[in-house]
Structures are given as C-alpha cells and as structure tokens.
Image: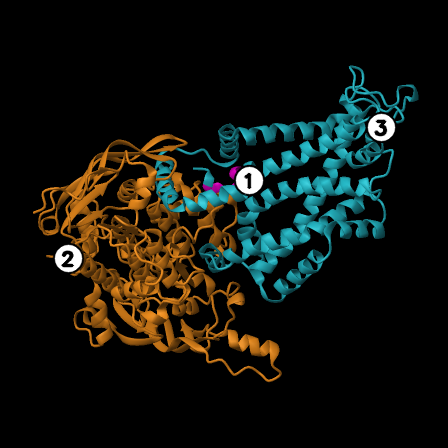
Amino acid sequence: MMTAVRKLTSGKRAVTATAAAAVAKAASAEAKQPSGLAATINHARYVIAENPVTGFAFALFALIVLCALIGPLLVPHDPLASETTAALKPPSWHHWFGTDQIGRDVFSRVIVATRLDFVIAVSSVALVFLMGGLAGVAAGFFGGWTDRIVGRLADTIMAFPLFVLAMGIVAALGNTVQNIVIATAIVNFPLYARIARSEANVRREAGFVQAARLSGNGEFRILLGQILPNIMPIMIVQMSLTMGYAILNAAGLSFIGLGVRPPTAEWGIMVAEGAAFMVSGEWWIAFFPGLALMVAVFCFNLLGDGLRDIFDPQRRT
Amino acid sequence: MVAVALLDIKDLTVEFHTRRGIVKAVQHVNISIGKGETLGIVGESGSGKSVTSYAVMRILDRAGSIAEGSVTFSGIDLRAAPEEQVRTMRGREMSMIFQSPRLALNPIRKVGHQIEDVLKQHAQADSAQLTNKAIEMLDHVKIARSRERYHAYPFELSGGMCQRVVIALALACRPQLLIADAPTTGLDVTTQKAVMDLVTELTRERGLSTILITHDLGLAATYCDNIVVMEKGRVIESATSTKIFKKPSHAYTRKLMQATPRPGSTLRGLLPEGEAPPVPQKIQMVPREQKPLLEVTKLVKEFPRKGLQASLSRLLGPKPAPQPENFRAVDGISFKINRGESVGLVGESGCGKSTTSMMVMRLIDKSEGAIMFDGEDIGDIAPREFAHTPFRRRIQMVFQDPTDSLNPRYTAARAIADPLLRMGGIKGAAAIRGRCEELAQQVGLPTDLLDRFPHQLSGGQKARVGIARSIALKPDLIVLDEPTAALDVSVQAVVLNLLQDLKDSLGMSYLFVSHDLNVVRLLCDRVIVMKTGQIVEQGPTEQVLFEPQAQYTRDLLAAIPHPPA
C-alpha cells in the first residue's frame, strides 16, 4: 500500500522531479563516492536515518530474527512443560502473558514459536522466488511458448480460492511443516511470476541487453547476469510483503488443524486453542500469539519500502 | 517599445534541498520579456534553464523552493500569489509546452476531448460550442482533416502531430505567455522546422510572448529576438540574437557556438582553442585486396502487420484470415563500406536506418538480400547463434542512449570488461582490469571513475564507457547509432573528435547512423540518404551535402536551422 501511494505521488511530480534529479546528479558527481559493500552500508544507514518508519521496521525485524535464533535460550519457562496447578492464570509478574488451559507459559510459547513461523516464512518465500521468480523472468525475456506455459500455469493457480488451494495441497501431501512451505509457495507462484514477467519484459529490448548480446553473451547468461539483478529490488520488496502473507497462511492452516500439530508452539495453533477460552474471559491465550502475528506481518510489510530504497542503485545519489 | 515587461524575473535564486545539503540550481537570474517578444534561454544540461521556467510556473518539486528574488507577471507577484490564483493563471495566462509530446498527452483520451477539457477548466466555451472550438484549435495548429483527427488517440498520431496537439492545448485559452521547454527534442529536422514555424506564426498572430528553452543555439537564434545564455545556474550573457551570433562577448557563449557543428566548421574547430589533442598517428592501412569490408545487396526487412481484424478472424472464423500485407521497413538497399572508411546513414525517423543497422549487427533477421562481411555471407547466421561466431567480435556497436545501454547495476569497469570476459581471451582479474584501464585511457575516461555506477557518471562519461566497450575487442566495423544525440554540444564535440581519432589510430570502419547532417559531414567520407526504406541518394559527403541531386536531400538540408550569420 505504502509503495503504491508513494508511486502515485512521485508520478505526479515526475516532471519537476527530473530537474531535481539533474541537480542531485550534478552534486553527486562532484563528491567522491565509496564503492562496494561500504557504500551499501552507508546508504542503508542513510535510508534508515531518513525515514523513522523504516528504522522502526528494521529494529522490529532484528528483534524477530533474534527471537528466532536464540528464543529458546531467553525464555523463562519450558514452552511445553505444563503446570496444572497454575492453569488459566491471567498475565502476572511471574507469567507475563499468563498461562493456558494446561498451565503452559504463554510468553515462552510465543517467543519460541517465532523460530518455526519465521523458518516457514523464509523458506516458502525462498522457494516461491526460485520457482515463480525465475519462471517469470524467463517468460518475460524469452516470450513465445515459455511465456504461454508460465502464464497459463499462473492463471490456473489464480483460478482457485488461494487458501482453499493451500488447504487442499496440505491435506493431500500430508500434515508436515515441509508441506506447509510447499503449499504457501505454490499459492504465491502467480504473484511472483507475473511481477517478474512484466519487469523482465520491459527490459528485454533495453540497450544494455543488446550491448550484452554484442559482447558475446548467450541468452541464458543475459537472463541471469543482466536482467535478474535489475529486477531484484522489486522482487525483494515482493518477498518482504509475502513473508507476512506466508506467516498468516501458515498460521491459518494450523488454526484449522492442517499444518503444525499440537503441542508444538506455533502462533496459529495457539490462537486456535485460545479461541475457545475467549468467551469465558481468558482472552490472553489467543491475544498474545495473535499480537505476535500481527506485529510480524506489520513489520514485514513496512520493511518492503525500506528495502527497495536500499537496493535500488539509482537512489544512491 | 513596450515600457512594462510582461514577465519580469529579478534576482531569482532557486534552491533544492538534497541529501548533500542545499544545491543552488539557479542563482541571481534576471530575465525580462515584453509583450510580443520571443526570448530564447540557451544552456547545456544542468544550467538551470528548465528550473527557471518551473519557478515561473510555480511547479517546482517539493524539494525546490524560490529562495530569493521576485517573479512578476503583468503586475502580479507570482512568488507571493496564493496557489489558487496561480492555478487559474496556468493555462489561461501562461502555458507551457513540454519536451516529450507523447508524455504530455493522456494516452487513453481522444485528443479532441483533451482540448475540450482545458477549455472547460477555464470556462472558455459553453458545452454547445466545445466540439467546434476544439476542432477550430486543431485547424489552427494545421492538423489536416481536423474533424477526423478530433477522434484520434495520441498513439495514432506521429510525434510531430502530437506536438501540434500539445501546442493547441497550450494555446486553447489564449494565454499571454508561452513557455516552450525544448519542444522539438526528439523530432526530425523537417518536423522541427514545421513545429517551430507554426509556433512563430501563431505567436505573431496573437501577439504572444514566447520563451524558448533549448540547448541548440542555432535554433534559438533562428526563432528568437533575444537570447539569454545560462551556465551553472547563472545568466552569463543576454543580448539580441544577431549580436550574440556576430559578437558573443562571453567565453562560454563562444565555446558553445564553436561546438555547434555548422557548415564550414571542422572537427578540431569544434573544440575550444588550446584544448584540441594532437592528431594521432594514422595507422598505415595495408593495401590488401580491394575487397570491401561490408557489402550489403538488396537487403529487405519485412514486418508482418498485426491487425486486429486478422487476429479476430483467426480466432473466430473457420476460414484463414486475409493474408496481411507485410510492412517493408527496409526495401532492397545496397551499399558498401571499405576498410578504414566511415559511411553516414542519414534519414528521418522511420526511414529504416536503425533497422538496417540492426540487421548489419546481426541483432535481427533479414527478410531477403545478402550481407557480406569480409567476403563471407553473415546474413544467414541466426542472431541467436551469431554471438558464438568469430564474426561477433569484429562487428561492434555504440548505442544512441548512453544511459540505456549500460546496465544500471554494473560499474563502468564491469561494463567495459563484459566483451573481454566473453570473447577477449584474457584470463585473470588483474589482466582484465589492466586492459580496462588501458581502454579507459584510450577514450579519455579517468581511471578512478571505473568503479562508479552509470548513474554516478555524466552523459559524456557514459558515452565514453560505451565507446570503450565497443572498441575493447578491436573490431573492424563499428556501427554508431546516433552516438551523440543525447549529449550536449560541447560534449558532442569532444566525443566526435574522439571517434575520429580512434578510427585513425585503430584503423576501424564506421557506419554512422544519424539524422544530423552537420555531424555526418564532419565525420563521414561518404553519405547514404534513406527515405521510407529506400536509398534516395549516396555518394561522397561533399557532393551529397553541397550538390544534392535528390529533392529529399535538399529538403533535409533546408530544414536545418539557419541562424542569422
């Protein structure tokens, strides 16, 4: 959403922006520029400092990664140990997020679940990038039959209600984490294929592609070496956005009982389990994992904008 | 003759807030234009000429602001006026024509309706007269069959036509001031002449004041009464056209004038005195067999016309679609290029010159004919396979747009190294880097710029990177596709000299594709003039340009702006 809004405003100002760009370019040509990794880090620091929202998103992301990496070491209680005497206790100093129906510490379970949800999100996004992204780039660059096959495949997937399709895949393949990853990836395939296709298609006849042909590059080398790096900024934004979607999807599958099985700590199951207790007033069992889900998805959505600014070389003026 | 100026810019300074602090794009500029006057603002890119006009129209970017000075338009202080007031003035009191006519028009709205929109906006006509008024405007800008064209979409019109529609839009509400920001960039010379003649005629007729913003001193001098020359945000000279041409007082104006190719100027003469490099030693061409390097015979390129009707009948009807007539972009042309010779290929857009060069480059297939390179037929090798033949390294190309032809994610060194990595036969990072530096020196690119990305380089530097890449494999033939079209004149002067020197020292042959006859005259031994896919005239440069045989060549030559000498 934010991306779209920003694009709109920038479009309206395009005419005058060129003048400013020319000025900025002149300024940058005079200053000496560091290169390589150092420049990227410098630039990232600038982007984060310039936009506090991006900085906030990055801080949140760092927190999520930290929880995913060393969460189990940080938590005060064993996420699986039940303490029947302390069941259904509201949040207190001892149990920050309270305890659930069999006396497990909700705070510990929410933190520990980060790793599983994060892994599902990252691996499904990586998988869909490899499948959808590459198929889309090839479709846009080669056109013809490649384009037709990839296009129709994407159309077919789009024809299903996506969550129902994911349910079907997991039900058919079996109730494992691996299959959740595959299902989430397949559901996102059309999105990646279409974006990659349109981005590759506009660059197909670009001057630098022709120049690469003259330099003796084969078509595949041009595809991977020239086209792909240029559409990476867009793909990275897309990946960040689908990370949030992938977490929701995985949690949704677990919520309806397809996916991760109890007693494993996972946000979706925890919300599902806690939902039954909402009516009787024990709101904290479902609330805190739900909050964690929301924060994670929110963070990934915010991250997209910042990542685009960092990875686009044109913005590094 | 007019006491009070229509537009009076006093001490204008425009600032842009950027990452690296405040940049002053325009500094203490004083410009004044009376009623019915035409003023040319001339300068190279980054001189602040466009920013000045944006400040007048109050359409500066959010990052930009007027820091000092005043802009007064017929007594109204534009800097202090509320946005509401300025909005009603835009279009009705002062209008603007932008550089790219296609971008200035809404692509999904009929041009007639777009003119009506403007009229409605400023309540210039009631709804009963709207259509008639719009058609009248189209007539005014000399669009033939205006009643029919009223219903046309921008994509159905040529570039010149689109620019006429934009002019119609700008003049629809009878403004007092017209600002034309490089209105003819990207248009052919004959179209440029037609558009500029039209603007002059209309503005005279209506007593309009016009500001023409351009980088072309010749164009400005031909069509303007007064000229303001800008450099780096400052006005450095301001005088009448004739005076500027006869006696330019500032060194920069002289440099600019010198760099503009005119009949009678020489390649070295384009450069400022004292900056011309020594003429390199000409390589001794071994007079081998007198076989031409490139020989093209009866070359044809046809594109299938993809009509909606044909597609529909293919989908719906059982009978085959009526055979669509093919469009002949190149229609049986033959020419030769000898070793060490440079040949100019001239024509207006759509004449098939680019298609021809793409076929010679083996980037697209030919339909018929033969392309003999060094005695061997390369015309039948498929473009996809050509990259793997030994011929690839012997034919290279310099592209029209130096920005578009460089991968934005590759540094200059990586771009130059690309052909070396694929076909150079050089192994090892150090050796390749060494060759890159050698090439950079050859094209006059400072080696410390090699690690920069394209957007960190200026236009001229990018052009040098493109040239270095094309000569990296020491090719025999280079196709130059308008290599200086996107560059400022002073940079063009340097690049043209560089190309000439490289040709002399490396013994290459050039096929120089261009629409600028003055540039072709400087660089080429022979000229081929193309029109609608056919060659209308070819011969030695002097003969074609000074004693043209074909009427078309004469038209082309006549359309070049002739400033008062």
* Residue kind at label 1, given as amino acid type: Met
Q: Amino acid at mark 3?
A: Ser
Where residue A235 appears, as percent x and y from the top left, is 59, 46
Chain coloured orange: which letter?
A: B
Q: Is residue A103 magenta?
A: no
Q: Which residue is mark 3?
A: A280
- Label placed on residue B434: none
Label 1: how many residues lie within 10 Å, few (<14), some (14-19) or many (20+)?
few
Prevailing SS of the magenta stretch: helix
Camera-nearest residue between A228 and B42 = B42
Name the quarter where the N terminus of chain A is drawn.
top right
Could you say where residue A59 lies in the image, as x and y percent from the top left? 61, 27
Which structural element holds mark 1? helix
Query: Where does label 2 land, which residue?
Result: B563
Q: Who's the residue at 80% across and 52% down the image?
A: A169
Residue at 49% of width from left, 51% of height from top? B426
The residue most toward the right is A84
Please, is residue B475 above or below residue B34 in the view?
Answer: below
Q: Which of the two discs, 3 and 2, sits closer to the camera?
A: 3
- Residue farthest bottom in this picture: B319
CB contact under 8 Å: marks 3 and 1: no
C-alpha separation, residue under disc 3 versus residue under disc 1: 39 Å
Q: Is residue B341 above or below residue A28?
A: below
A36 sits to left or right of B462: right
Give the percent coordinates (x, y) of residue B69.
23, 32
- Front residue of A239/A272: it is A272
The magenta region covers A308-314
Q: How dense is the environment of label 2, judged by Cα within 10 Å: few (below 14), some, or many (20 and up)?
A: some
- Chain in cyan? A
Subunit of label 1: A
